[in-house]
Image (spheres, grey):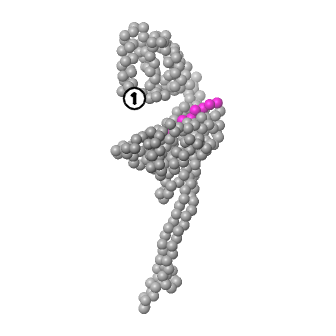
Amino acid sequence: MRRISIAALLTLLFCAAAHAQQDPNKKFEVYPVGIADFDLVAETAKQMASPDGKIIADAAGRRIIVVDKPEVHEQIQKLIKALQIPQQNVRIRVRFDEHGSSRRESLGVGGTLKSGNVTVTTTGDPRPGIHVNAIDQSGHTSSMTQQELLVINNGSASLDVTTEVPYYEWIFNYGVIKGFWTSGTQWKLVGARLRVKPTIVGNNIRIKLTPELSRLVDAETASVALEKLSTEVIAGNGQEISLGGLPADVQEFYSKFLVGYDEGGHARSLNIYLTPTIEEPPQMPR
């Protein structure tokens, strides 16, 4: 649901209160939604409203502003009370398999050099003469880390991917081409996150994934969510799924997005696995 800015909300509240004063058959009230499903309350309240009534949904404040007849207010009050049911949570275990490459280059000098009565030995090498040893080694590295997210059903949480994106230029140009930002945008210290939104559907969990970029602009941290690149995956309760099988139309972007640096400054790719598990809410006291 679209969020309302504070200025716009204040304007709507003022207009709603003024509208209620002009019509004695209507009254103005603000109803906190509590633990009820906000989207369900908002959509149902709009359906309950009279033709000339007004319903304003404030998602940020989790409240419904109503200007309508007393009987509509009564129905909305009953609706909110009936939906005060503890929501299920989804615990998501996240496993990162990190793969990268490493390279070691070194140059060493060793041996023994004798001149007159003076003998010089370097690096403990007793062989006569001076020897130069060059080492050029490369190999592959891998590691695994885990973290957990506890998210209310239909809620969202952010999953940190990396604090610095190696393919920044590619992602920046991709965003310019797609119209996400302009070519004149100045960014520094670009990091990557995934916003995760689980929705319980029977014994399955539908997970919406939205990539986010955090950046430093004029010494202030800001972020942008790439909603057009959102994708969804479905897993059974307790089933592990890999993000490697994302749709082809977003796969190229994610192949650059799900990459970071290791402690040695080498790029490493991330294979991310999610295991969502439904957790029943605690029983409410009677």
- The outermost residue toward the top is 24
Whether residue 158 can be seen here: no
Q: Which is more toward the observer, 76 or 181?
A: 181
Q: Report the quarter where the C terminus lies.
A: top right
Count neighbours of disc 1 (C-alpha within 10 A) and say few if under 14, some if 14 to 19, many if 20 or more. Answer: few
Nearer the observer, 74 or 131? 131
- Picture quadrant where residue 92 is located: top right
Say what secondary structure mark 1 lies in: loop
Q: Does the magenta stretch include residue 55?
A: no
Q: Position of residue 161 (x, y in %)?
A: 50, 46
- Please give the residue where the numbered disc 1 appears in the rendered image: 5
Q: Residue at x 42, y 91 (%)?
A: 116
- Residue at figure coordinates x 51%, y 25% from the top left: 38
Residue 114, position in %: x, y?
A: 45, 88
Q: Magenta stretch? A: 195-202
The quarter of the picture where residue 88 lies is top right
For this orientation, the residue located farthest to the front is 177
Instruction: Identify the residue at image location x=45%, y=12%.
Output: 52
Q: Looking at the rendering, which quadrant does residue 219 occupy?
A: top left
Above or below — where is 189 with respect to 52? Answer: below
Is residue 156 visible to us here? yes
